[in-house]
Image (cartoon, rainbow, N blue to C red):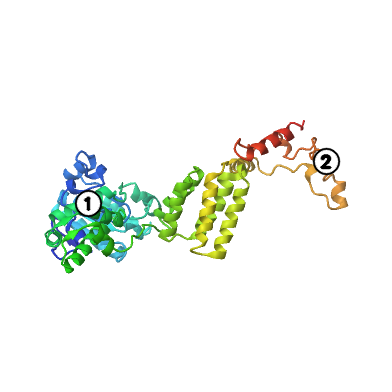
Amino acid sequence: MDLFPPSEPASALSPLAERMRPATFDDVVGVPDLAGADAPLRRLIENGRVPSLVFWGPPGTGKTTLARLVSRVANLPFVHFSAVTSGVKEVKAILEEARRRARFEGTRTVLFVDEIHHFNKNQQDAFLPYVEDGTIVLLGATIENPSFYLNRALLSRVRVVVLQAHAESDLVGLLRRALERDEALRGQVTSWTEEALSAVARWGNGDARRALSLLEETAALLASEGGDRLDADVITRLAPTLQLRHDRGGDDHYDVISAFIKSVRGSDPDAALYWLAHMLEAGEDPLFIARRLVILASEDVGNADPRALQVAVAALEAFRFLGLPEGALALAQATTYLASVPKSNASYAGLKAARAMVKSRGNLPVPAHLKNAPTALLKDIGNSEGYDYPHDHAEGIAPSVHYLPDALRGTRFYEPTQRGFEKKIGELLDWVRGRRP
């Protein structure tokens, strides 16, 4: 926790990312809905009518920067609080101090709760009365989806500002600004190429803090060698290996697997391979990917190519046998196969329709001719009576036998498409149905 004036400057000893925090909204990039010249939210803040906000986005997208900037522009006291290192007891002390300040000084307090998702939904209730009566302006920062981590009462009292990973062009602009404005950096780097800035921006991978840190470290290493020109070769030689932004349980995990699934479903093997490579390079569990391929084979390919399920299951077993790195080849083979074959969700849609019917109609009785009759008693009461064995007929069907409950006779759940092998299935079923009365 700390309480400091909104205008406190960064120390010369601070990291470059700290020294380059925007001093005005005009210096902010990538958040036009908040920082744009005509943004209504910016006008509210500049007029002192600051709403409670939650900044949601990946690391390095400016959540803390925006919180400090909002406080500075509105000229309000700013309290920085971490939900990781402190608890509700500390929050209550801060809130009471804010109430005292509001009563005796007539000033609201900006309370910035970093990583607010670490407070459980009951703990979040501590903020409600203070937000409600205007004692505090609550600013939260989170990398997790607020819809899942904030309780409804608090979520209804704040605006969620969605921050996206910075575009490469935005990061290049930030890096150029740092080289032009930062005194310490100007003393180390006197010239640079755009290719070098693009290389640093790509390494930043949407994270401004990472990109600025790499620029600062590279400049220091370059200066220690007696150099002062930053080019692509220097970045390649001095920069660490690019790391992908990913997680196994958050939004990145779900967003990338969603892109992968939709690429396979959309019959784009190139995009599917890209997202597969992204997940593997980022450390995703390969068995999770393999299980998704098995699901895809049934849900999205189905009987348009019945071999798809065999390929997917074989890839799963091959990976279990091989592990990484060779097992990735089996995942790639299954991915490209599933993305390239005809698609049908008719089996999936049919199951959904049948389940809906079961839920709406309950336990409809099994027709007597379909019931099991392993004993004499069951035969005597009529079980299996009237059943006609299909193999006793030359065409392999018993035209007079119906298999659905009597109340659903004639209902269709499975409607084959005209794609791939399923077209032949549909023709066969039309032929069979045409022979039943």
Snapshot quadrant of residue 202: bottom left
User: Where is residue 99 shown, x and y percent of the image?
Assistant: 21, 56
Residue type, numbered disc 2? Asp
Relative to 324, residue 150 above or below: above
| Front in this rendered view, residue 367 or 155 | 367
Task: Spot the residue most to the front.
Answer: 233
Disc nearer the start of the sequence (2/1): 1
Provide the residue designation for mark 1. Answer: 194
- Which residue is painted at 19% across and 63% down in the image? 219
| Front in this rendered view, residue 235 or 202 | 235
Q: Which mark is residue 216?
A: none
| Residue 279 visible to the viewer | yes
Residue type, numbered disc 1? Glu
Relative to 295, residue 213 above or below: below
Q: Quadrant of the N terminus?
A: bottom left
User: Where is residue 322 shown, x and y percent of the image?
Assistant: 54, 64
| Front in this rendered view, residue 103 or 376 | 376
Q: Secondary structure at mark 2?
A: loop
Q: Quadrant of the C terminus?
A: top right
Q: Secondary structure at mark 1?
A: helix
Q: Which mark is residue 388?
A: 2
User: Where is residue 29 shown, x and y percent of the image?
Assistant: 23, 47
